Amino acid sequence: MDSVIETIQLSKKYATSEALSHFDFKVTKGEICAIIGKNGAGKSTLFKLLSNELLMTGGKIELFGHHYKSSSEVKKRIGFLIERPKFYENLTAYQNLKYLAKLRGITHTNRLDEVLKLVGLYEVKKHKVETFSIGMKQRLGIAQAMLHHPDCLILDEPTNGLDVEGIANIRHLILKLNKEYGVTILISSHILSELKMVAERFIFIRDGRLIHDITKAELEEKSKKYLLLQVDNVPEAVRLLETHFKAIQYTVLPNQVIQIHNYMEEAHQINKILVEHHILIKEFRIDQKELETYFLELEEAESNV
């Protein structure tokens, strides 16, 4: 598939630390790719290197198959929203975009209305930015990033500090840009449940290193629903399960917990059989591994290396 962003052995070193170390990854055309990591993991460093706000100390970046410094036309194909967008608070949304468009050599003023409609701010385009909520400012930030018709958007924490409604608005906007306009998106966020709703691929980063790369389909395969039982007599419960459900797949966990990986549709029958045989069930629930759990397990595994 066509590569939109690719880093090869990308590194950023400071005098006493290394913020990014030999980082190799690729974003392909049309996908939404999420970068996940704790504070200080290297997410913002990566985004600032891609936007040329920071200079690399090693490796290289390719955009649309070209070295990112080789062509200004290549750079124009990407829009950025890095951290909190800054605007002139005493100007209107329209005036801010008009000023930014002029700086970028964009002369078609009809594009201003287009992007304002796209992000849902057309009706308030004559309102001063100082009256905008944080969520509205974030959407205006995405509008400015879309002024030049980019093929790719790089969004660093676009939902940071937003309320539930603001987060939902950004989510719907990201999906709209991707599905209806074909925009490739690289995104980071601390709200992993939101990332799972929009992204098709997840890149996990720790201490400036890529530690895991997984697609949504692969994650869902590893995150299938399971039945969690806590009982007073594990050996007897296991015997009953094996007797009545010949193909049952299970794992015995600490604290008298049994995790059953199949027979979800038979959950009621499992409960009935155990109760009939006087097994005391302390806990009985269907669960699923969430993205947050997967991330924490990766972090724990890396910390034990």
Image (cartoon, rainbow, N blue to C red):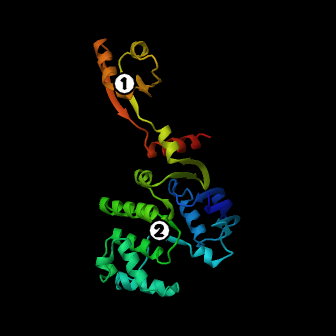
In the image, is 86 to the left or to the right of 19? left
Who's the residue at 52% across and 84% down the image? 104
Q: CA distance from mark 1 to mark 2?
A: 45 Å
Badge 1 is on which residue? 230
Considering the image in quadrants, where does the N terminus appear?
Answer: bottom right
Q: Earlier in the sequence, mark 1 or mark 2?
A: 2
Q: Position of residue 75 (x, y in %)?
A: 60, 74
Who's the residue at 50% across and 85% down the image? 106
Q: Position of residue 70 (x, y in %)?
A: 69, 75
Disc 1: CA contacts within 10 A as few (<14), some (14-19) or many (>=20): many
Where is residue 68, by image quadrant? bottom right
Q: Position of residue 15 (x, y in %)?
A: 67, 65
Badge 2 is on which residue? 83
Q: Secondary structure at mark 1?
A: strand
Name the amino acid type tagged 2.
Answer: Glu
Tell me if residue 119 comes above or below residue 99 in the rendering: above
Who's the residue at 31% across and 75% down the image? 132
What number is the disc on residue 181? none
Q: Position of residue 220 (x, y in %)?
A: 47, 42
Task: Decide if residue 255 is in sight here.
Answer: no
Tell me if residue 278 comes above or below residue 142 in the rendering: above
Q: Nearer the viewer, residue 93 or 74?
A: 74
Who's the residue at 44% across and 36% down the image? 224
Q: Secondary structure at mark 2?
A: loop
Residues at marks 1 and 2 touching, judged by CB atoms closer than 8 Å = no
